[in-house]
């Protein structure tokens, strides 16, 4: 018996990584997304002034599910690339950008800290770009799987920035609060 794995063995090895990585990434993203009321479920978010380019609310969970699947596949490709030079650093970068991704939702929607969330998304974009470059040095397909995520978080960063501009006091916005008007 030779020491090299057959194509079928290699394919099965990748599938095992994908069967772990994809559901794990999707589940963690889902847990972060549902940890606080967000989108249409958030009275605070509905009360914010948003830019005209804000997509409809139904698009966010669809987009994030697709992006998490792609990220999980990219991660599986790199996990499968045992012995590849730079693999450990690439995995560390992935973890950093993913942790930033997971904390953005609770900071933005839960704590209503729009400015801090903007800084988090900037850091996420930098880390995700570094991850994509590192992935590309190992397996090009892994980098390409990260590209839609880079595009989406760039767009999300613009939305976050505009919401921050439109709502400088967003943290103190209390939707549905009675407003006292005194006319003289």
Image (cartoon, rainbow, N blue to C red):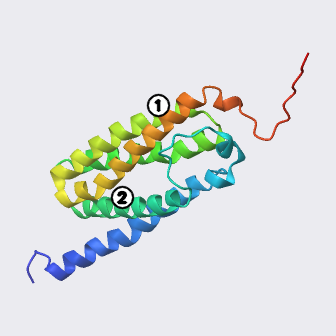
**Which x, y percent locates residue 5?**
14, 76
Relative height, residue 120 to residue 1 (above, below): above
Q: Which residue is drawn at 9% across and 84% down?
A: 1
Q: What element carries label 1?
A: helix
Q: Which residue is drawn at 41% across and 63% down?
A: 66
Q: Earlier in the sequence, mark 2 or mark 1?
A: 2
Looking at the image, residue 173 sits to the left or right of residue 159; the answer is: right
**Which x, y percent locates residue 22?**
40, 66
- Observer able to see residue 84: no
Looking at the image, residue 154 sits to the left or right of residue 88; the answer is: right
Q: Which residue is drawn at 65% across and 50% down?
A: 36
Q: Which residue is drawn at 53% across and 55% down?
A: 56
Marks 2 and 1 in Cβ contact (< 8 Å): no
Q: List the residue tagged with mark 1.
A: 119
Along the line of sight, the residue nearer the viewer: 168 or 150:
168
Q: List the residue tagged with mark 2.
A: 71
Looking at the image, residue 19 sits to the left or right of residue 79; the answer is: right
């Amino acid at each position: 018996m030779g020491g090299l794995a057959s194509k079928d063995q290699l394919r099965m090895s990748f599938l095992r990584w994908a069967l772990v990585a994809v559901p794990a990434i999707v589940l963690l993203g889902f847990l972060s997304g549902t940890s606080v009321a967000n989108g249409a479920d958030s009275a605070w978010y509905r009360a914010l002034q948003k830019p005209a380019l804000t997509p409809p609310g139904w698009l966010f969970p669809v987009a994030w599910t697709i992006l998490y699947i792609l990220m999980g596949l990219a991660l599986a490709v790199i996990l499968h690339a045992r012995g590849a030079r730079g693999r450990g650093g690439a995995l560390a970068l992935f973890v950093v950008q993913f942790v930033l991704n997971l904390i953005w939702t609770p900071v933005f929607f839960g704590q209503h800290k729009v400015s801090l969330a903007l800084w988090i998304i900037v850091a996420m974009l930098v880390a995700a770009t570094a991850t994509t470059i590192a992935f590309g040095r190992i397996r090009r397909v892994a980098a390409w799987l990260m590209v839609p995520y880079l595009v989406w978080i760039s767009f999300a960063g613009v939305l976050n920035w505009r919401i921050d501009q439109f709502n400088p006091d967003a943290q103190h916005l209390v939707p549905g609060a009675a407003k006292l008007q005194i006319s003289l």
